[in-house]
Image (tube, grey):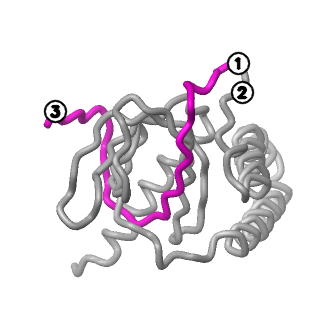
């Protein structure tokens, strides 16, 4: 098996939903994977909130540098919006009993699936994480499919068309999981 290690990988639990696509998603169509899932409205809302947070982050820091109290107040408002978004997501994604251990990196993931998927097959994936609560929909291409004794098939897929906000979501999820793992280890 060829090991591709372009990114740091971490094992964590997630719900993986997938939709097989008949053809390669077009970049010109916006390559929005959320449209393939029934909970896409909440995903689109959360993605837009993340984009706005990225867009406003530098401006918010400038405001905080100029007026500390106003900057802190804006930070509190941002946290309130995050709490509301988390609540909305938790009402949409509640079946964490079906979560599985996946290997996640900024470049892709490896997960178990009950059926084989052909190499180079296009997918829309929705990944839902319980801790911290987050969901994202992404396009991916199957790069490897191998039988896994008793667990169906082990699928390796590469993410495609990640924008800055999606890449940051994946990166933050990996960093949070690393911090949580380090916190649980005895000193």
Q: Secondary structure at mark 1?
A: helix
Give the residue drawn at x 72%, y 44%: 35
**Alpha carbon of mark 1 to alpha carbon of mark 3: how far?**
32 Å
**Alpha carbon of mark 1 to alpha carbon of mark 2: how far?**
5 Å
Residue located beneath label 3 in the image: 2
Residue 42 in the image: state x and y as whole percent.
Answer: 76, 58
Residue 134 in the image: state x and y as whole percent.
Answer: 60, 61
Q: Is residue 37 left or right of residue 41?
A: left
Mark 2 surroundings within 10 Å by alpha-carbon count, few (fewer than 14), some (14 through 19), many (20 or more): few
Residue 61 in the image: state x and y as whole percent.
Answer: 72, 45
Name the image quarter holding residue 181. bottom left
Q: Is residue 99 left or right of residue 139?
A: left
Which quadrant, please, contains the N terminus?
Answer: top left
Residue 34 in the image: state x and y as whole percent.
Answer: 69, 45
Q: Which residues are magenta?
A: 1-28
Give the residue drawn at x 56%, y 42%: 124
Q: Is residue 12 magenta?
A: yes
Q: Is residue 165 magenta?
A: no
Q: Earlier in the sequence, mark 1 or mark 3?
A: 3
Mark 3 surroundings within 10 Å by alpha-carbon count, few (fewer than 14), some (14 through 19), many (20 or more): few
Name the residue nearer the viewer: 128 or 26: 26
**Alpha carbon of mark 2 to alpha carbon of mark 3: how far?**
32 Å
- Residue 54 vertical position relative to residue 38 in the rendered view, above or below: above
- Residue 107 vertical position relative to residue 46 in the rendered view, above or below: above
Check if mark 1's residue and mark 2's residue have beta carbons within 8 Å: yes
Residue located beneath label 1 in the image: 28
Which label number is shown at residue 30?
Answer: 2
Which quadrant, please, contains the C terminus?
Answer: bottom left
Q: Secondary structure at mark 3?
A: loop
């Amino acid at each position: 098996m060829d090991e591709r290690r372009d990114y740091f990988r971490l094992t964590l639990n997630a719900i993986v939903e997938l939709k097989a696509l008949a053809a390669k998603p077009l970049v010109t169509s916006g390559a929005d994977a959320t449209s393939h899932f029934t909970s896409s409205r909440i995903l689109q809302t959360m993605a837009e909130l993340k984009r706005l947070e990225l867009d406003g982050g530098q401006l918010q820091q400038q405001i905080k540098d100029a007026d500390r109290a106003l900057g802190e107040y804006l930070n509190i408002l941002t946290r309130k919006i995050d709490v509301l978004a988390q609540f909305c997501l938790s009402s949409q994604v509640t079946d964490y009993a079906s979560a599985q251990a996946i290997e996640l990196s900024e470049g892709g993931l490896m997960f178990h699936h009950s059926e084989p998927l052909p190499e180079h097959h296009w997918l829309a994936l929705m990944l839902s994480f319980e801790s911290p609560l987050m969901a994202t929909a992404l396009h991916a291409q199957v790069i490897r499919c191998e039988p896994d004794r008793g667990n169906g098939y082990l699928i390796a897929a590469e993410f495609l068309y990640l924008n800055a906000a999606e890449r940051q979501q994946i990166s933050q999820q990996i960093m949070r999981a690393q911090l949580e793992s380090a916190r649980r280890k005895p000193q």
